[in-house]
Image (cartoon, rainbow, N blue to C red):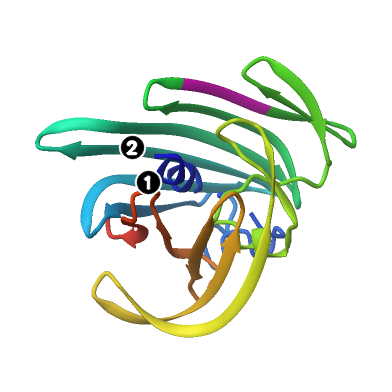
Amino acid sequence: MRKLSFVLGIAVTVCLSTVTGAAAQADGKVTTLHFAVTRNGEQIGSTTLRLQRNGDQIVAETATNVQVKIAFLTVYRYEQRLTERWVGDRLDALSAVTDDNGRIHRVSATRSGDALTVNADGKISQVDPAMMPANLWNVSLVRMTAALDPKDGSVMPVSVVDRGNEQIVVQGRALTAHRYSIRTTIPQEVWYDGDQRLLKVELRGSDGSTINTTRSAT
């Protein structure tokens, strides 16, 4: 379930002018985006992203809940609560608690001047002060060569291929979306709308299943 756990932990920035596209431009406005997580077409969970901007600060909160069941028996469970605070175009603080099928991880990151310090399950390290989390709602990730995994605090390589615009169907509507092939520890296909907000993520599970995270109404 490693591939499944990775994509479920992906859910969040960009330069301040585009961090939420057309959303959350007014101070204090809250934008909420919902995503359905499916495995071979069957819904197994959801992710909710909440964005709020105040002046040059943006707070992003992500909640993910997933259960994979076989014959009414839960064989895999994943939950994550992730909060990020951005000041300008820099990550100022991060806090994440992840339950990966019973394994609990606690990760935090704090900035002091030009230093970004990460605490991953009690292990302290410093990372590149320009580092950003590997959260796919943040289209800036496509310009990075490394990113911080909020699940376990590790730094992972990032490579991207720009596939250009194409038509996809989301919530029963045909939309023009920009597609990227993004490889971190795993390959995944990612689509963003015209406002540079995340629409869909698709990857293959280790068992050959197709896992999608797609924008939904609720």
Q: Quadrant of residue 71?
A: top left
Amino acid identity at mark 1: Thr
Q: CA distance from mark 2 to mark 1?
A: 7 Å
Does label 2 or label 1 sit earlier along the sequence?
1
Between 29 and 80, the one lying in front of the other is 80
Circles 2 and 1 in contact, beta carbons < 8 Å: yes
Q: State the predominant SS element of the stretch in magenta.
A: strand
> Which range is magenta?
104-108
The three-letter code of the residue at mark 2 reads: Asn
The residue under the point 57% across, 58% down is 26
In this rendered view, identify the residue nearer to me: 152 or 165.
152
Residue 192 in the image: above or below residue 3: below
Q: Residue at horizontal 62%, vertical 18%?
A: 121
Residue for point 81% across, 47% down? 130
Residue 69 picture location, percent across and down? 19, 37
Q: Is residue 140 visible?
A: no
Q: Which residue is mark 1?
A: 47
Disc 1 on helix, strand or loop? Answer: strand
Name the residue furthest front: 207
Q: Is residue 64 magenta?
A: no
State whether residue 163 is above or below residue 187. below
Q: Is residue 104 above or below residue 21?
A: above
Camera sees residue 43: yes
The reply, left or right, for residue 146 in relation to residue 192 is right
Label 2: which residue? 65
Rendered-image quadrant of the N terminus: top left
Residue at left offset 43%, top offset 59%:
203
Query: Which x, y percent locates residue 156?
Result: 68, 45
The answer to whether 130 appears left or right of 68 in the picture is right
